[in-house]
């Protein structure tokens, strides 16, 4: 029953290894901040609104997730 070509014998984490979205070490969701890479402005991240869709109120650069 344990042949070499049979998969699914790991820890149950699947192929992604449980590392979050896009293979990174953080997941999306509640909490955290959006930060401007240009001027350093920070604001609280709002669930359901990607930071990359928000413009910095100080310099109009698109924010990124901290």
Image: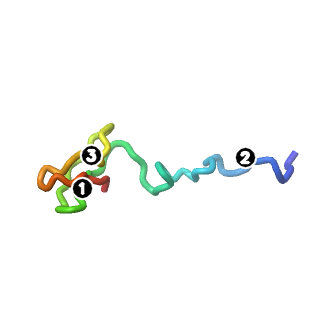
Helix, strand or loop at mark 3: loop
In-image side of 6 versus 10 (left or right)? right
Instruction: Identify the mark nearer the N-term, 2 or 3.
Output: 2
- Of residues 4 and 13, the one nearer the viewer is 4
Q: Position of residue 50 (x, y in %)?
A: 32, 44
Total count of labels: 3
Disc 1 versus disc 3: nearer the observer: 1
Which label is found at residue 35?
1
Q: Circle 1: is it few (<14), some (14-19), or many (20+) Cα within 10 Å?
A: many
Helix, strand or loop at mark 2: loop
Q: Which residue is mark 3?
A: 45
Q: Which residue is mark 2?
A: 8
In-image side of 63 versus 22 (left or right)? left
Pointers 2 and 3 in contact (CB under 8 A)?
Answer: no
Q: Position of residue 48 (x, y in %)?
A: 33, 37
Instruction: Identify the mark nearer the N-term, 2 or 1.
Output: 2
**Which residue lies at the image location 46% right of the left edge and 57% below the top edge?**
25
The Cα–Cα distance between marks 2 and 3, rounded to whole angstroms, is 37 Å
As drawn, the residue found furthest toward the front would be 60
Pointers 2 and 1 in contact (CB under 8 A)?
Answer: no
**Which residue lies at the image location 30% right of the left edge and 40% below the top edge?**
49
- Of residues 10 and 20, the one nearer the viewer is 20
The Cα–Cα distance between marks 1 and 3, rounded to whole angstroms, is 9 Å
Helix, strand or loop at mark 1: strand
**Which residue lies at the image location 24% right of the left edge and 52% below the top edge?**
62
């Amino acid at each position: 029953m344990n042949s070499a070509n049979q998969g699914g014998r790991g820890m149950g984490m699947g192929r992604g290894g449980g590392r979050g979205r896009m293979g990174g070490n953080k997941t999306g969701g509640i909490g955290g901040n959006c930060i401007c890479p240009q001027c350093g402005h920070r604001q609280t991240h709002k669930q359901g609104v990607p930071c990359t869709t928000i413009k910095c109120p100080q310099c109009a650069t698109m924010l990124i997730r901290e």
